[in-house]
Image (spheres, rainbow, N blue to C red):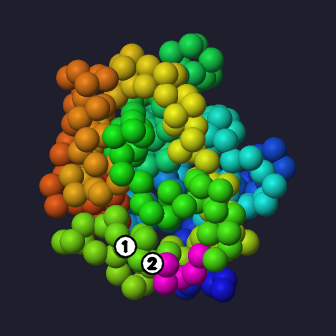
Amino acid sequence: MSAALTDRVRRWLERGEREHFRGHGIHVFRRDGDGPLLLLLHGFPSSSYDWRAMLDELRGRAVLAFDFLGFGLSDKPCGHRYGLGWQADLTTELVRRHGGDGPVFVVAHDMGTSVATELMARDLEGELGWAPAGVLLFNGSIVLEKASPTPAQKVLRSPLGPLAARLTNRLVFGHQLGSVFSAGHPLGPEEAADQWSLVCHDGGRTLGHRLVGYMDERVEHAGRWHGAIRDWAGLQLAWGLEDPVATTAVLDALRELHPGVPVTELPGLGHYPQIEDPARMAVVVAEAAGR
């Protein structure tokens, strides 16, 4: 069963604007302010809505956040191939439109970390067209063989994926999402309702098997993206240490790829630090961005 947008999500919708890229509508939140423009890249299966409480803690900061195609309040074409290269192209275009000539600091979570590593790889090749002032990655299964995907992710990647996507309901979704939160900061019923309404919006409930394809790309492009982790200067990491998916084994692998990379460890937080403790995460982002 589908779900109407909650009142809280509708208020978030009203704070943003609808833009278009390659014929598709994209939900974009843009705020003028101080410091480098914070470019916020969300993860799977959620959206830019994940950032709203953290943004309230970062009042006065310039921000660009948006929903990737297929997610949240953006269009969800059923026949589209949701490749991360396409999402990286979208990201670059939005930076071109809204970044001006000032510095842009990238903050990326979960699936968004792989979009960020593609941007880093393009920058190393001299093909990005803009220069990130810095990159902060957190809680993404970038080194996939070290991660522990959820049962839902495993099924969605399997031949049963299309059926599993069609059968997904609010109860199953809430259980799976709640399982990646820390015990000290559990998923609340309002947040669960908000996230479910965003997944269902515009027919998105049945697209999970298509959207989860980013995990296969992490295998296909491992050499390229791990190379970007190794070679790109200005990289920083933050990590919720209670994450059961992007575990500390992933963090250890990233440290091996980039010895000496600055890391902010977040004990007591799980896969969604920006939702679990937005004030704490706001401090991490502000310090990483140089303020």
Which image quadrant is residue 277 in?
A: bottom left
Q: Position of residue 101 (x, y in %)?
A: 56, 29
- Residue 28 visible in rendering: no
Taking 144 as reference, is 261 above or below it?
A: above
- In the picture, which quadrant includes the C terminus? top left
**Is 34 in the magenta?**
no
Q: Which residue does the numbered mark 2 point to in the structure image?
A: 174
Q: Is residue 161 left or right of residue 285?
A: right
Please name the residue shown 21% across and 71% down the image.
183
Mark number, residue 178? 1
Which image quadrant is residue 98 in?
A: top right
Q: Amino acid at mark 1?
A: Gly
**Is 171 in the magenta?**
yes
Confirm or deny contact between disc 2 and disc 1 (CB under 8 A).
yes
- Residue 121 visible in rendering: yes
Mark 2 and mark 1: Cα distance apart in space: 6 Å
Please name the residue shown 25% across and 25% down the image.
256
Magenta residue span: 168-172
